[in-house]
Amino acid sequence: MEHPLSVSDVTQAVKQTLEMQFPPMWVIGELTSFSQPSSGHRYFTLSDPHSQLRCVMWRSRSITGFRPTAGMEVLAQGQLTVYERRGEYQFNVSQLFPAGVGQQLIAYEKLKKKLSEEGLFDEDRKRPLPEYPRTIGVVTSQTGAAFRDILDVLKRRFPAVRIVLRPAQVQGLDAPEDIAQGIADFNSFGEVDVLIVGRGGGSAEDLAAFNDEEVVRAISDSEIPVISAVGHEIDTSLSDIAADVRAPTPSAAAEIAVRDVLEVREQVGRLTLRTREAMQRLLDKNKDLLEAHEGSYGMRRLSDLIFQNAQHVDELHRELYALLRRLFESRLADYYRMTGKLGSLSPLSVLERGFGLVQREDGSVVSDAGILTPREHLHIRFAKGEATCRVEKINR
């Protein structure tokens, strides 16, 4: 016969098996027999028409937003376990919500996990905001208080900034598509440096559009940095997580988007003063250094070298002028000599001695009287002038 197990051993084995086989889960049911003794722990039962599940919720777990009452349909998240003293299994509850809100939370967490796994919430995707934006785009309701708050803050902090509103529905069935389209419109517009997307506060149903997948993807895909400005400081929407910067309210988003012009002016004034002081210190230092070296031999030697070089330049100038003059005179003499030779070889110089140049009418030179014919006209060129003659007689 095998060694028998104790009741505690059996209960421990069941507890371990149960907890390993059933990970944390969500359970929906009707709340019955709710009690909260002085210890602060809550004991209740979740039931449906066919079964019941005993539950415990320790006082360290808070219940926010509603008061549990018998007959209410609730959604509980927790872990199946065993109460060893009684050997009964029970549901250890960590979160408790009204059924409608709880189902929304489940959908929220499911979508959040999906988008997170796709990397839409990664920090390295987030872009820094420009320090001095010239144009700010706003996607929100045209009639809501959020836009008026944004406008007031921007005009007070930095009046020179340009503000462009793209009106959008911020609650209702059509709101997610309209908000996403507004973000896309600004990206197509291309003349905006920062986007503020959001609305004023409201209930969870009012803010549901900013947990919509279409809006979250539009924010993530935007090439323009986005500030999420959904007016709820307690809860965090998926738009807040996807945006480059989250602001708790529309007014806070406007304060984040631009710097205070008075602070900028003060900073410019301080930097200007520091620059002037630094330049003055540099000038004073260089002045003292110059005065210290001004009377040194090196400085006097420098001046002497400058004057000597200037004198040497003058001497070179005179030598160059003399050289060019001699060269010019030599070339002029060569010119006269060559023109003299050329003149002595010219046919015109022969004509000066009384000779003439005889040409026929076609311009050919006559050197033999035998080629002439009686009564032929000839041209005779003299040293001075020409004459036209007619052949009367030919002597060969």
Image (cartoon, grey):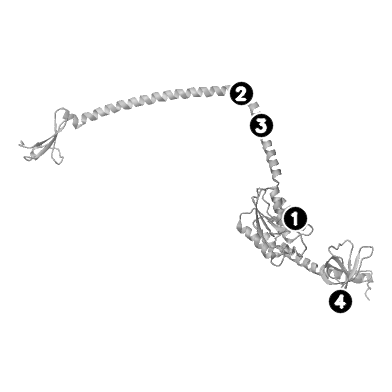
Q: What SS does tag 4 mark?
A: loop
361 or 20: which is nearer to us?
Answer: 361
> At 65% from the left edge and 60% from the top edge, which residue is drawn?
182
User: What is the number of callouts on the image?
Assistant: 4
17 or 249: which is nearer to us?
Answer: 249
Residue lying at the far bottom in this picture: please name it: 50
Judging by the rendered image, the residue that carries numbered circle 4 is 51
Mark nearest the camera among 2 and 4 is: 4
Q: Amino acid at mark 4?
A: Ser
Mark 4 or mark 2, which is nearer the start of the sequence? 4
On-image quarter of the N terminus:
bottom right
Judging by the rendered image, the residue that carries numbered circle 2 is 294
> At 22% from the left edge and 29% from the top edge, which residue is drawn?
343
Q: Tell me the distance, in whole angstroms, between the alpha carbons under discs 3 and 1.
A: 47 Å
Q: Residues within 10 Å of mark 4 (few under 14, many from 20)?
A: few
User: Vertical placement of 219 versus 2: above or below?
Assistant: above
Asked whether the beta carbons under mark 2 and mark 4 sit within 8 Å of each other, the answer is: no
Classify residue 375 by image quadrant. top left
1 relative to 250 in the view: left or right: right
Mark 1 or mark 3, which is nearer the start of the sequence? 1
224 or 87: which is nearer to us?
Answer: 224
Judging by the rendered image, the residue that carries numbered circle 3 is 280
Q: Amino acid at mark 3?
A: Gln
